[in-house]
Image (spheres, grey):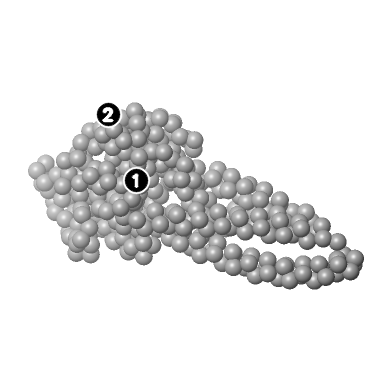
Amino acid sequence: MLLRLAAQRRVLFVGGKGGVGKTAVASAVALAQARAGRRVLVVSTDPAHNLGHLWDRPVGDRGVSLAPGLDGLEIDPARTTDEHLRTVGHTLRRLMPEHLSREVDKHLELARDAPGTHEAAVLERIAEVLESSDHDLVVLDTAPSGHTARLMSLPETMAAWTEGLLRRQDRSARFGAALRGLEDDAAARNIVGTGRRDLRADRDQEIRQVLLRRRTRFAELRDLLGDDARTAFVIVLAAERLPALESIELYGQLLRSGVSVGALVVNKRSPADRGEFLARRRAQEQVHLDTVREALPHVPLIELPLLAEDIVGESALERFAAEIARAR
């Protein structure tokens, strides 16, 4: 069922509480889709990257081939933030008067550690990846629930923020046009020249173009995330109290952000026929799963077994993908 969900989408987000096996599920699904003939990219947005550890090979910010038809990429939040601020700084210094360049540098340095800066930079990078990728499927292995919930709400926030900047820029441009009209009258009387007027007009137009590009980017990303024909979110959880409650909360946050949850994946489910201890453990797990089913009765729920060995490398991921294919 999970593989069918992925086969029908272009973007698949895999999220949930830390330590529940998000990276393994994301990688196994991506590998299965690559084996089925699709070109797939699996992307880690978690600052504590596990993609390279899982595949037992280096995976960096520029991407590598993991298997035939499957590429991997780890978004580095610190590097992404630095590049984001550097680009913003270059644009601002080019558009702002020269005497304000020090103020630009000071505010950008303060912004580096401001709340939301890293998330906004990562969101920009995700948008870039989705825009530029020619893969059939992009699987995003996300950060733990709280970070991911904020990330999913950001396209709406950033679109609204950019829209506000555009309105302010329009008001400023109208004021500038009125001022330039006065300067034109004065120029006609040979009192002032028009060189500064043209520079301001060009700067205002370029600022507007920058804001329009950002508005378009965030609007398209918001539309993609909200389109359940192209995008789905899979919540991975363990059959334990805290992951169960956190998954219910994450579902509500995603719903408010307009993101469709395609499935719940219960990972590392204890077997019922391997001794009394594991049977009792499974019975306890069922209590927490009943809580999830009561809260989210309409969301498909898939159970994956607890495996005897660690999942490391392509062969182990292939076996795990086979378990996913068998799961109901």
Picture residue at 43% right of the left edge, 31% below the top: 64
Q: Can you give x and y, in whole percent of width and height, for residue 195 in the image?
A: 82, 57
Circle nearer the N terminus (1, 2): 1
Q: Identify the disc placed on residue 10.
A: 1
Q: How many marks?
A: 2
Along the viewing direction, whichever of 191 and 166 lies nearer the viewer: 191
Along the viewing direction, whichever of 89 and 311 lies nearer the viewer: 89
Q: Can you give x and y, in whole percent of width and height, for residue 127 in the image?
A: 47, 49
Contact flag, marks 1 and 2 (Cβ < 8 Å): no
Along the viewing direction, whichever of 189 and 72 lies nearer the viewer: 189
**Tag 1: amino acid:** Arg
| Closer to the eye: label 1 or 2 | 1
Q: Secondary structure at mark 1?
A: loop
Residue farthest along the right direction in this orientation:
190
Q: Can you give x and y, in whole percent of width and height, for residue 41 in the image?
A: 38, 38
State which quadrant residue 170 falls in. Answer: bottom right
Q: Secondary structure at mark 2?
A: helix
Residue farthest along the front direction in this orientation:
188
Structural distance between the alpha carbons of marks 1 and 2: 25 Å
Vertical position of residue 61 compared to residue 120: above or below: above
Q: Can you give x and y, in whole percent of width and height, for residue 269 in the image?
A: 19, 47
Vertical position of residue 176 compared to residue 238: above or below: below
**Tag 2: amino acid:** Ser
Residue to which mark 2 is pinned? 315
Residue 23 in view of the camera = no
State which quadrant residue 7 falls in. Answer: top left
Left or right: residue 107 compared with residue 45: right
Left or right: residue 254 compared with residue 115: left
Q: Identify the disc placed on residue 169.
A: none
Q: Residues within 10 Å of mark 1 (few under 14, many from 20)?
A: some
Picture residue at 20% right of the left edge, 49% below the top: 302
